[in-house]
Image (cartoon, rainbow, N blue to C red):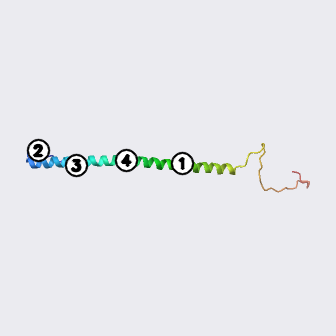
């Protein structure tokens, strides 16, 4: 890091260094204020976008749940129907007993 000796500087150089440091600090502070101001301005926009996204997600989720429920058959009185392809094979004596 470069060291600056103030004792060897003239008054004009000291003023220039002080103004340069003040300008650098002012620019840094302005950048921080600008960044924070932009963040504060964007917070409500982000909140509204998140609220809309959350609302749409809940709407899609409810539609999917409703579609799932409408596809499911209502339960009957303890009986289930199992559909299968089958063939009746005659027994050893030729009868067709099931």
| Secondary-structure class at tag 4 | helix
- x then y, percent, for residue 25: 23, 46
The answer to whether mark 4 and mark 2 are in CB contact below 8 A is no
Other-residue count near label 4 (Cα within 10 Å), few / some / many at <14 / 14–19 / ≥20: few
Residue 18 visible: yes
Q: Nearer the viewer, mark 1 or mark 3?
A: 1
Query: Residue under circle 1?
Result: 55
Query: Residue under circle 3?
Result: 24
Could you say which disc has been placed on residue 19 in the image? none
Toward the top, the furthest residue is 78
- x then y, percent, for residue 76: 77, 45
Could you say which disc has been placed on residue 6 in the image? 2
Residues at marks 1 and 4, CA–CA distance in whole angstroms: 24 Å
Q: Nearer the viewer, mark 3 or mark 4?
A: 4
| Secondary-structure class at tag 3 | helix
Residue drawn where x is 29% and y is 49% of the image = 31
Could you say which disc has been placed on residue 39 in the image? 4
The one nearer the camera, 53 or 8, is 53
Residue drawn where x is 48% and y is 48% of the image = 50
| Secondary-structure class at tag 2 | loop
- x then y, percent, for residue 80: 77, 47
Other-residue count near label 2 (Cα within 10 Å), few / some / many at <14 / 14–19 / ≥20: few
Mark 1 or mark 3: whose residue is earlier in sequence: 3
């Amino acid at each position: 890091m470069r060291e600056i000796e103030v004792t060897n500087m003239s008054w004009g150089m000291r003023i220039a260094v002080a103004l340069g440091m003040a300008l650098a600090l002012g620019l840094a502070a302005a950048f921080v204020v600008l960044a924070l101001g932009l963040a504060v301005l964007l917070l409500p926009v982000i909140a509204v976008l998140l609220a809309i996204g959350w609302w749409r997600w809940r709407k899609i989720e409810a539609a999917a749940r409703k579609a799932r429920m409408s596809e499911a058959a209502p339960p009957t009185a303890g009986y289930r129907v199992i559909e299968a392809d089958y063939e009746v094979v005659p027994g050893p004596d030729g009868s067709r007993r099931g």
